[in-house]
């Protein structure tokens, strides 16, 4: 009798282990599907070129960077913000924060007609080519008072201004840390000085980010009806939407902070 119980116990162990392995494999596969369906992978693919496009826009007005310096910047961006590496790291972070049940529920939303429409709009808006159009159309789109009012609810649901401000500061801090670790002169690069500067300019940074998000959101969702936009906001405000959005933002914050430090390391090595 004891031997029978032992044999059943061993058999249960192997069966349960196989089941757990299948569940984990299924979770990995379904999470990969979610990253495709949500546009996360496409947005990460655009990330390096968008960073370079933003730098190119800023250069004439705000700095006198040489062609060589811009070339160094571009090389460091390509190395630090490699899309495949970002996607791999994003997958690993989301895997730890989302259950298979959560993933399936989010996929149900993403596979809905409205979910698919919104994803397509967000992917298009994430491309470097959309930068100019976002700015060019802002003054016209901002005249839609009803949509601007809905944006307030959208921002309350996503907390994008707060998250993006934190993300921006983390990125800057990561780059400076990399400079210091790679031998940059403390007189030229100081982590303490950066923290003081960030605190001093936080309100201005937040204001600038709020404006950028307003421009981007008006452009991205302009083809949605108010009813469709409200439905999207309802999803984002739901427990599932909040859990998914928060996990995505946390994961993105972590992987871009890592990439920011790598960027600093590469830029130092390229310039020396």
Image (cartoon, rainbow, N blue to C red):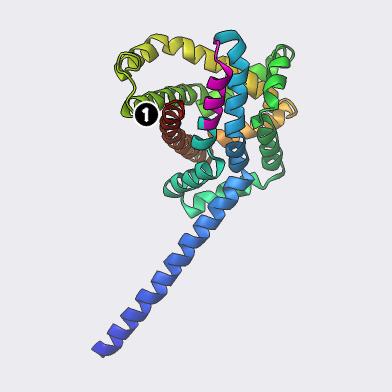
In reply to whether residue 70 is colored magenta, the answer given is yes
Secondary element at image label 1: helix
* Residue 25 appears left or right of 2: right
Q: Decide whether the magenta segment is chiefly helix, strand or loop.
A: helix
Which of the image's four quarters has the C terminus? top left
Depth check: give the residue in front, 115 or 267: 267
Which of the 4 image quarters holds residue 64?
top right
The quarter of the displayed image where residue 43 is located: top right
Q: Nearer the viewer, residue 177 or 222?
A: 177
Which residue ends up furthest to the front in the rendered image? Answer: 272
Q: Say whether residue 67 is magenta.
A: yes
Question: In the image, 169: left or right of 27?
Answer: left
Please give the count of numbered marks on the rendered protein. 1
> Is residue 36 placed above or below 24 in the rendered structure?
above
Q: Residues within 10 Å of mark 1 (few under 14, many from 20)?
A: many
Q: Give me the residue at 42% from left, 30% from top.
A: 269
**Residue 63 location (% of width, % of height):** 54, 10
The magenta segment: 63-75
How far from the left and from the top, in percent, is residue 186?
30, 17
Residue 22 higher or lower than 232, as above or below:
below
Quadrant of the snapshot with the N terminus: bottom left
Q: Which residue is mark 1?
A: 178
The residue located at (55%, 21%) in the rendering is 68
């Amino acid at each position: 009798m004891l031997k029978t119980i032992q044999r059943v116990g061993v058999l249960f162990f192997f069966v349960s282990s196989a089941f757990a392995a299948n569940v984990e494999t299924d979770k990995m596969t379904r999470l990969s599907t979610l990253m495709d369906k949500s546009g996360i992978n496409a947005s990460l693919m655009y990330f390096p070129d968008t960073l370079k496009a933003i730098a190119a826009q800023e250069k004439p007005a705000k700095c006198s960077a040489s062609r060589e310096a811009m070339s160094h910047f571009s090389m460091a961006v390509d190395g630090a913000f490699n899309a495949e590496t970002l996607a791999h790291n994003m997958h690993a972070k989301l895997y730890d924060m989302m259950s298979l049940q959560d993933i399936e529920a989010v996929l149900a939303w993403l596979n809905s007609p409205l979910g698919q429409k919104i994803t397509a709009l967000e992917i298009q808006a994430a491309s470097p080519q959309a930068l100019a159009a976002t700015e060019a159309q802002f003054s016209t789109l901002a005249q839609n008072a009803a949509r601007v009012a809905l944006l307030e609810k959208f921002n309350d649901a996503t907390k994008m201004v707060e998250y993006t401000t934190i993300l921006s500061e983390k990125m800057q801090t990561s780059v400076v840390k990399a400079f210091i670790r790679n031998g940059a002169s403390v007189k030229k690069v100081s982590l303490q000085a950066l923290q003081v500067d960030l605190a001093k300019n936080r309100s201005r940074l937040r204001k600038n980010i709020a404006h950028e998000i307003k421009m981007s959101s008006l452009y991205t969702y302009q083809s949605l009806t108010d009813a469709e936009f409200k439905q999207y906001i309802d999803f984002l405000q739901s427990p599932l939407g909040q859990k998914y959005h928060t996990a995505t933002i946390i994961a993105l914050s972590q992987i871009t902070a890592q990439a920011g430090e790598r960027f600093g390391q590469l830029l130092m090595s390229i310039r020396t």
